[in-house]
Each structure stands twice: as structure tokens, then as C-alpha cells.
Amino acid sequence: MDLIQSLPLFPLSDVVLLPGLSVPLFIFEPRYRQMTRDALAGSRQIGMVTVRPDSLELMAGDAPIFDIGCLGRIARAQERPDGTFQILLLGKSRIRILSEQEREEERLYRSAHVELLCDREARAEQEIEAEQQARSTLLTLLERLVERSARDEDHARTFAGFARLAPAPLVNALTQSISFHPIERQQLLEADSITSRFEIMADLLRFRLAETGASEPGTRPLLN
């Protein structure tokens, strides 16, 4: 078990970082300006976590958060004259919060003891076949969605660009290209395998197709 004894936490309601992706952030609150300075002086690592949707009114304090988040590394940072920061955060690994740490008097931000999470890899023949089938289903749904959202001359090129991607880059590309709700992104983050992410994303695409009047049978309800 790989552990980080003390990782700064950055809870947000509208941004969910996934491994392999990056996100630009504007840091303006005093507690997170302090967090950014401390991270830049140390490992440059921050734990991005999502505030639970029924607790948004508590964000000024220590709002309840999901226990699965993403370890991010500050790739670029620029401090502005007013003390705020522009940073680019790269997603490195999924994490599970094991326990939050008591806050020292001088520390304004939250910090936690976390476990680094690894994806389950498809090893057995049956698991590999399941991943391939899930990918095929996802691409079929994606092609139908692209047909309804891209101009005719762009459809083939857009779909071909996605279809040639390997499994993990495919999930990341779709996550960046489709406007998913933060809770939908949280679902993808909590999935522990590529196959699970393919299946969740297929459900999300079925939902998008249903919105356009082209529903797919067998749709499962989305998690809240």
C-alpha cells in the first residue's frame, strides 16, 4: 500500500481532476494561496477532492467531501502581484482519503493521510474480452452521438480520431470533449478499472442520446 502521510486537500464543487488530465486553476482564497505556497516549497502535490453536492452551502468551512480524489502535481505556477496564483495541475493518481489531520494553528487549509490507488488491470482472457466488448459498445454509442453533434463533413474525421485511441487515452479524450457534470466525472474517477470506466461512460452517452431523442435500450439510471 502506497501512502502519503500529509497531503494538502483542495475541495471544489465544479472541478474533478482525473489521472492523465490537467486543469488550469485560479487560486484566490487566502487558505488556498497558503496551500499553493506550501506545495511549491515542497513536493508540489495537492489532493483534488469533490465536495458532496448536498453540502455546497458549507464550502466556506470544511464541507463534506468524497473520499476518492486525485493526486495532482503543480506543473506551472505564476504568482500575481496581489498574491493570487495561476497554476496548471496535472492528474497523477487516484487517491483514497484515510483520515484528515488535525489542523495546526498556522495552517489554514485541510490536509489528509491518503492511499494511492492503482487500477485493476484486465489480465485473464475473460477480463480482456470484457474490456474489448465494453470499448466496442462505447464506440458504437459515441458514433451515434457524433452523428448528431458534428457537421456531416466532420463526422467521420471526429469519430476516427477517437476510435484509434488506446483505452486510457480514449477515456481521457472523451472526458475532455464531452461536457460531463462534476458528479458524472466523480463516477469515472471512482471506477477502479478501464472496463468500469467504459461501462460508466457508455451509460452517460446513452443519457446524452436519450436527450437528443435517440435513446438506447437497456439504459441504467445514473448514480447521484
Image: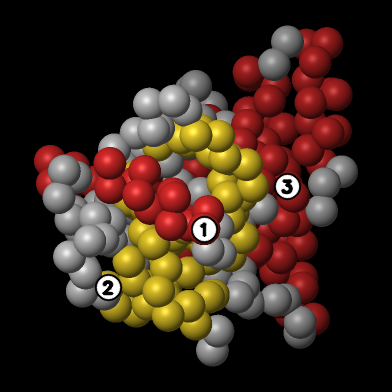
Which of disc 2 and disc 1 is earlier in sequence?
A: 1
Classify 79 as above or below 194: above
- Left or right of 111? Residue 198 is right
Amino acid type at mark 3: Leu
Q: Do the residues bearing badges 1 and 2 touch, measured as CB atoms within 8 Å?
A: no
Give the residue number, with chain letter if any, for mark 1. Answer: 41
Which of disc 3 and disc 1 is earlier in sequence?
A: 1
Amino acid type at mark 1: Ala
Mark in front: 1 vs 2: 1
Q: What element carries label 2?
A: strand
Quarter occupied by residue 81: top left
Q: Is mark 1 on a helix, strand or loop?
A: helix
Mark in front: 1 vs 3: 1
Which of disc 3 and disc 2 is earlier in sequence?
A: 2
Q: How many labels does the image show?
A: 3
Residue 18 location in percent, x, y?
Answer: 55, 52
Amino acid type at mark 2: Glu
How far apart are labels 2 and 3 at the CA level?
34 Å
Give the residue number, with chain letter if any, for mark 3. Answer: 170
Classify 172 as above or below 129: above
Residue beneath the point at 67% across and 58% down = 134
Mark in front: 2 vs 3: 2
- Left or right of 94? Residue 149 is right
Give the residue number, with chain letter if any, for mark 2. Answer: 100
Residue beneath the point at 28% across and 56% down = 109
